[in-house]
């Protein structure tokens, strides 16, 4: 790329007329710098990962043996509810937003995000939203205990008093997501460097553009859903109350119309990350770039018309079941194209196995396993057997732990040296990877068989014959959970260690793209003069 030298001059020349970031506490509260806000999002996500993870370990510890051994059933239900909500809204979404804030301006050659103050606000809503959600654990009565999908009437007629705090916190999270998504759309449309055409944008940017549109489309639906809950609880409406002429099934339709596109919101940015990591460590250009772009958009579009596959057992009309079965299978096509193209990129590549690449390959294998169990779940007659069993839990953890968590970790390992100027210990990274992969598979593989044998999900107690596999799952979960402490150590060390050796600007041999042309570590202000992309 011929703009490299030009970008260097710009990057190094920034110190004279800009003092760096302001010092101390106010820097983080008032910041409008995309890198600072990205760091805030990622830090918040890391804290929530350990909170949500501890809840998961409480769940697994209780399930180590049949009977009540650690916590009472009501607290168990609170844990399953809070674990799901925190992992989805407090870990994956903020981490993906943090990566977007950090990387999109660098990848498209923009000096910052388009709406920097809105950016600051969209982050600072989150700590308040989650403080409110978690404060329900300390309230009289019970915290939300109706599962992370909060079906009516469990959350309306029978919901604990703390449900109102939960509703308000969901509103705040949704508002935060809408603002972040708006910002990303405006930035990508208006601030690309000269020469950065649509079909030259990195796939990470493409995947976030599609994700941002998904967020703008479905977050208001979730807001409508929890608003109707609030009305039913306090204003004597009957949206979801059959006694007043409403329909509890309406809740499921509205919720899953949000909830199914939501799973693609959690996963598409991860696909973008993998599309940056695999070409770099294969020393090849991504295979089938255009098809990857179209596949990303197709997944998002089809994702809007498959919501009822979460509801096959609700007595839906036969024709609806047939339609949703075929539509759900259709999602496998664009996803399959992506897997094929990543494999095509690896084929005859000059591959090395640094930590980001290990997590990318771990994602490929385990996401594919999750995809296969997803196709099984799309079959209506089979789904009658699998529904609400541990098979479903196994399926979505294979998809989300690999598709979201592994891709976020791959992204952090990939870009951390560029952010901090420090290279981490490759040996520790490999330990983290292997413990995570082994722990994850030991935790979630047996759940497929538990589910097929008839063990229902979301229960604190189970029949004696399920004991052995549950003990395996619990051991795997603890290995996986404690492996993340290595990750924590690596990240903290990279951020605070003294710089020992100077890293080159491109950090990884074979790294392509504008973000690898700026100095390492990334200066506080970048691209004051837009680079020209050839």
Image (tube, rainbow, N blue to C red):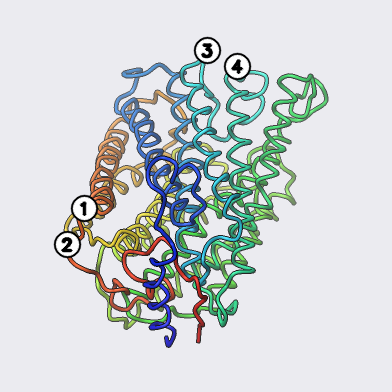
Judged from the image, the secondary structure of the residue bearing numbered disc 1 is loop
348 above or below 428? below
Whether tag 2 and tag 1 are in contact, CB under 8 A, the answer is yes
Q: Give how far apart the Cα atoms at labels 4 and 3 are.
A: 7 Å
How packed mark 1 is, by other alpha carbons closer than 10 Å (few <14, some 14-19, many 20 or more), is few
Q: Earlier in the sequence, mark 3 or mark 1?
A: 3
Give the Cα distance between marks 1 and 4.
47 Å
**Mark 3: few/some/many CA within 10 Å (<14, 14-19, 20+):** few
Question: Are circles 2 and 4 on residues that touch, CB within 8 Å?
Answer: no
* Cα–Cα span, label 2 and label 4: 55 Å
Would you say the residues marked 3 and 1 are in contact, meaning their CB atoms lie under 8 Å apart? no
Check disc 1 and report the residue beneath it.
Answer: 497
Q: x%, y% of residue 525? A: 44, 63
Q: What residue is disc 2 on?
A: 500
Q: Which residue in the protein does label 4 denote?
A: 161
User: Which residue: 71% across, 21% down?
Assistant: 233
Q: Vertically, is 291 above or below 296?
A: below
> Circle 2 — which element?
loop
Residue displayed at 45% across by 53% down? 38
């Amino acid at each position: 790329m011929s703009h490299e030298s030009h970008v260097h001059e710009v990057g190094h020349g920034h110190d004279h007329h800009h003092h760096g970031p302001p010092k101390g506490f106010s820097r983080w509260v008032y910041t409008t710098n995309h890198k600072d806000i990205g760091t805030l999002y990622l830090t918040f996500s890391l804290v929530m990962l350990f909170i949500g993870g501890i809840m998961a370990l409480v769940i697994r510890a209780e399930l180590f043996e049949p009977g009540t051994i650690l916590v009472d059933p009501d607290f168990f239900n609170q844990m399953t509810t809070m674990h799901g909500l925190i992992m989805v809204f407090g870990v994956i979404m903020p981490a993906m937003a943090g990566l977007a804030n950090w990387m999109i301006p660098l990848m498209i050659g923009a000096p910052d995000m388009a709406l920097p103050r809105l950016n600051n606000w969209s982050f600072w809503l989150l700590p308040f939203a989650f403080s409110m959600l978690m404060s329900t654990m300390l309230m009289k009565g019970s915290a939300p205990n109706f599962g992370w999908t909060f079906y009516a009437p469990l959350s309306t007629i029978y919901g604990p008093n703390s449900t109102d705090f939960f509703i308000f916190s969901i509103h705040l999270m949704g508002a935060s997501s809408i603002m972040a998504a708006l910002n990303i759309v405006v930035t990508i449309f208006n601030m690309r460097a000269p020469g950065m055409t649509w079909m030259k944008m990195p796939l990470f940017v493409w995947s976030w553009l599609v994700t941002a549109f998904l967020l703008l489309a479905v977050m208001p639906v979730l807001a409508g859903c929890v608003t109707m809950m609030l009305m039913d609880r306090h204003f004597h409406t009957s949206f979801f109350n059959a006694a007043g002429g409403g329909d509890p099934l309406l809740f499921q339709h509205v919720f899953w119309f949000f909830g199914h596109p939501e799973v693609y919101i959690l996963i598409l940015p991860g696909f973008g990350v993998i599309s940056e990591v695999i070409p770099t460590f294969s020393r090849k250009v991504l295979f089938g770039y255009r098809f990857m772009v179209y596949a990303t958009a197709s997944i998002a579009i089809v994702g809007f018309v498959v919501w009822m596959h979460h509801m096959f057992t609700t007595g839906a009309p036969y024709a609806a079941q047939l339609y949703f079965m075929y539509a759900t299978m259709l999602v496998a096509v664009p996803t399959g194209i992506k897997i094929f193209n990543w494999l095509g990129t690896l084929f005859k590549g000059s591959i090395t196995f640094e930590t980001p690449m290990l997590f990318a390959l771990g994602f490929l294998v385990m996401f594919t396993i999750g995809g296969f169990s997803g196709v099984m779940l799309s079959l209506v007659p089979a789904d009658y057997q699998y529904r609400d069993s541990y098979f479903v839990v196994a399926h979505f953890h294979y998809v989300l732990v690999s598709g979201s968590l592994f891709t976020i970790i791959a992204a952090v390992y990939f870009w951390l040296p560029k952010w901090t100027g420090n290279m981490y210990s490759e040996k520790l990274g490999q330990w983290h990877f292997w413990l995570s992969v082994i722990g994850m598979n030991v935790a979630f593989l047996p759940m497929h068989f538990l589910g097929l044998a008839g063990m229902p999900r979301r229960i604190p107690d189970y029949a004696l014959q399920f004991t052995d596999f549950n003990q395996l799952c619990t051991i795997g979960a603890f290995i996986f959970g404690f492996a993340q402490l290595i990750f924590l150590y690596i990240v903290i060390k990279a951020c605070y260690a003294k710089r020992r050796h100077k890293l080159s600007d491109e950090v990884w041999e074979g790294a392509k793209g504008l973000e690898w042309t700026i100095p390492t570590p990334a200066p506080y202000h970048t691209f004051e003069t837009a680079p020209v992309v050839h």
